[in-house]
Every structure is written in structure tokens, then in C-alpha cells.
């Protein structure tokens, strides 16, 4: 197993797409975690603060730097969470990275190290752009909305009974969840849609015009199969309430169009998850030997 593949609770891998890594070249003899610790933390009040991680032969893993025990550090890196950095404009991100790199360069020198390879703002911004696209897809949910007809509303009790009758279970977050077979994690969720709220109790006086049924694309192994189960649940809820089905844009539900959208989203997510392959260097064609022409 390669060093970068070692993992443990709270650990990372240096190929993790969610982070930009600022790596170091350590001196010999190697410093200990306690020697690095006073210089390891920077920009503590910032959401995208660089967090220190180390790899130790004794532990054979990348782990978060702390002062609990002292280890000899074989490799050391700072990790900047890209999901925090993506909230900034490109100019703000560039200024922030320049300031951070300068601070980390100075910090590394305090324990005899240097940043290596030299961190590139351009590379960080490129990785940030790729991570932002992937994060948007990872967070994407597929929705089917059960809507009361016209401008009508249904009571919390009516929604509660319809959702339970359709096979969903009341649970975490005062919402309803659908489980597939023996899975421990819910596959489908249900919550008030156009008016945010919760199902606090079956006899709550609250009323809602609609409830959205959804699943998160990145959390199910077979999105089209999950979509079929979600549609079946939605149909049962709709039938019990005499309601109608619409999509997340309040358009009459078109199951075929929704299936096509799921296929496209799944393809985009799989593409975003692919690790780009390094191109092999081109082999130079052997030079042809010159031949003497016969007189």
C-alpha cells in the first residue's frame, strides 16, 4: 500500500479531491510533531484555514497534527478545504492563497523545511474550479413534488397518514424517510417543499400546500432504480390525497423527462469523479540511418 493511501479516522489521503495540498521538503534528521506544532496553525479565524497533516513511519498513516503524542515526521503537508474556498470570488481566492502560501513558507522555515513543490496559485484555482463542479453534482438531489390541487392545502395529519401509508417512516429531523430493503441509511426523504417546515406531530395544526420526495444522486448506487421507487411512493401519496404530481419547477411531472435528466446528471457526476490519467511521454521515433548511394 502506498503511503498516500493509508487512512484512519480523521485522516486524509493526499489525492483527496476536496483539498489543495501545500507540501513540504523536510530536513534531515526529521523533526518531531512537537517541534512542528508551534508553527503549524495559521489563519485560524478563516473558513479555508490550512490544516496540518503528517505521515509517520511509526503510525503508517496520514493524520492530523496534534500535541497528544510525539512522532517523528517523515512527510508533512497543509491541506486547504476547497469547499470553503469556493465561497470566494476568484480575485479573493487568489489574494488569500498568495497570503497563505507566504505565511506557510515562513512557517516551514522555522522547522528547517521548505515548501516543495512550490505551490501554484494557478493550479490551486484550477483544482478549485473542478472541485466546485463536482461538489455541485455531489449535492444534487432529484425531486418529485406532491401538490394539493389548485391553491389547496393539506393538514399535517393528512400528509402524515399519506406518507406512512405509502411506506415511509417518521424519523430524524421530524421528517419522513424511505428505506430500501435492509439498508441502514434512508434512500428517500420527504419534507414540506415550497414552504419549509417539519412534521412536528401527527396532530399539529400546521398545513402545507406540497411535500417534496427526493433522493441525493451521489448517495444511491442505482439512481434510475431509486427513481422508480420514489415515483411509486409519490403515486401512492398522490392517490390518497387526491393531489397532483409536479417537478421541482412546478411543471406537471413528466417521468420520461425526469429519467433523462437523471441519466445526464449521473453521467456528469461519473465524469467529474474520474481521475485524469497522466499522459505517457511520447516516444521519439528512431532516427533512420543514412545509407550511401551506389555510384
Image: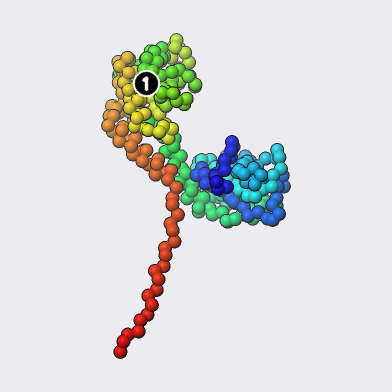
Q: Nearer the viewer, residue 43 or 50?
A: 50
The structure residue drawn at horizontal position 45% and vertical position 10%, both measured from the top left corner, is 203
The structure residue drawn at horizontal position 31% and vertical position 21%, both measured from the top left corner, is 235
Element at label 1:
strand
The structure residue drawn at horizontal position 71% and vertical position 54%, both measured from the top left corner, is 29
Colouring: rainbow
- Relative side of 109 to 86, left or right: right
Query: Quick one: quadrant of the C terminus?
Result: bottom left
Q: Pointer 1: residues within 10 angstroms few (<14), some, or many (20+)?
A: many
Q: Nearer the viewer, residue 241 or 255?
A: 255
Residue ranking furthest to the bottom:
295
- Whether residue 92 is visible to the viewer of this picture, yes or no, is no
Relative vertical location of residue 255 with respect to residue 198 in this rendering, above or below: below
Count of numbered marks? 1
Q: Nearer the viewer, residue 273 or 240?
A: 273
Q: Position of residue 220 (x, y in %)?
A: 41, 32
Q: Position of residue 259 (x, y in %)?
A: 31, 33
- Relative side of 131 to 230, left or right: right
Q: Nearer the viewer, residue 115 or 155?
A: 115
Residue ranking furthest to the front:
294
Relative vertical location of residue 51 with respect to residue 209 in this rendering, above or below: below
Q: Position of residue 66 (x, y in %)?
A: 67, 40
The structure residue drawn at horizontal position 41% and vertical position 67%, both measured from the top left corner, is 284
- Whether residue 160 is visible to the viewer of this picture, yes or no, is yes
Relative vertical location of residue 141 with respect to residue 126 in this rendering, above or below: above
- Relative side of 30 to 198, left or right: right
Q: Position of residue 159 (x, y in %)?
A: 39, 15
Find disc 1 in the rendering and name its residue: 210
Quadrant of res 137: top left
Quadrant of res 256: top left
Amino acid at each position: 500500500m502506498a503511503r498516500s493511501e493509508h487512512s484512519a479516522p480523521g485522516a486524509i489521503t493526499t489525492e483527496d479531491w476536496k483539498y489543495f495540498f501545500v507540501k513540504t521538503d523536510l530536513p534531515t534528521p526529521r523533526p518531531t510533531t512537537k517541534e512542528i506544532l508551534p508553527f503549524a496553525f495559521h489563519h485560524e479565524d478563516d473558513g479555508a484555514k490550512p490544516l496540518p497533516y503528517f505521515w509517520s513511519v511509526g503510525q503508517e498513516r496520514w493524520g492530523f497534527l496534534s500535541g497528544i503524542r510525539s512522532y517523528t515526521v517523515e512527510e508533512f503537508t497543509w491541506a486547504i478545504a476547497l469547499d470553503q474556498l469556493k465561497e470566494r470570488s476568484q480575485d479573493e481566492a487568489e489574494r488569500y492563497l498568495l497570503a497563505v502560501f507566504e505565511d506557510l513558507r515562513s512557517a516551514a522555515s522555522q522547522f528547517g523545511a521548505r515548501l516543495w513543490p512550490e505551490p501554484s496559485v494557478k493550479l490551486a484555482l484550477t483544482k478549485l474550479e473542478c472541485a466546485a463542479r463536482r461538489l455541485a453534482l455531489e449535492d444534487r438531489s432529484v425531486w418529485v413534488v406532491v401538490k394539493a390541487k389548485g391553491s389547496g392545502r393539506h393538514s399535517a395529519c393528512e400528509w402524515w397518514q399519506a406518507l406512512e401509508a405509502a411506506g415511509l417512516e417518521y424519523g430524524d429531523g421530524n421528517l419522513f424517510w424511505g428505506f430500501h430493503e435492509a439498508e441502514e441509511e434512508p434512500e428517500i426523504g420527504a419534507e414540506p417543499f415550497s414552504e419549509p417546515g417539519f412534521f412536528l406531530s401527527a396532530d399539529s395544526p400546521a398545513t402545507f400546500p406540497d411535500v417534496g420526495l427526493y433522493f441525493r444522486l451521489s448517495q444511491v448506487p442505482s439512481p434510475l432504480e431509486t427513481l422508480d421507487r420514489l415515483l411509486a411512493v409519490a403515486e401512492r401519496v398522490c392517490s390518497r390525497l387526491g393531489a397532483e404530481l409536479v417537478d421541482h419547477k412546478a411543471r406537471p411531472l413528466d417521468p420520461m423527462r425526469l429519467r433523462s435528466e437523471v441519466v445526464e446528471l449521473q453521467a456528469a457526476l461519473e465524469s467529474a469523479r474520474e481521475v485524469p490519467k497522466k499522459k505517457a511521454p511520447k516516444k521519439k521515433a528512431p532516427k533512420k540511418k543514412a545509407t550511401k548511394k551506389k555510384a
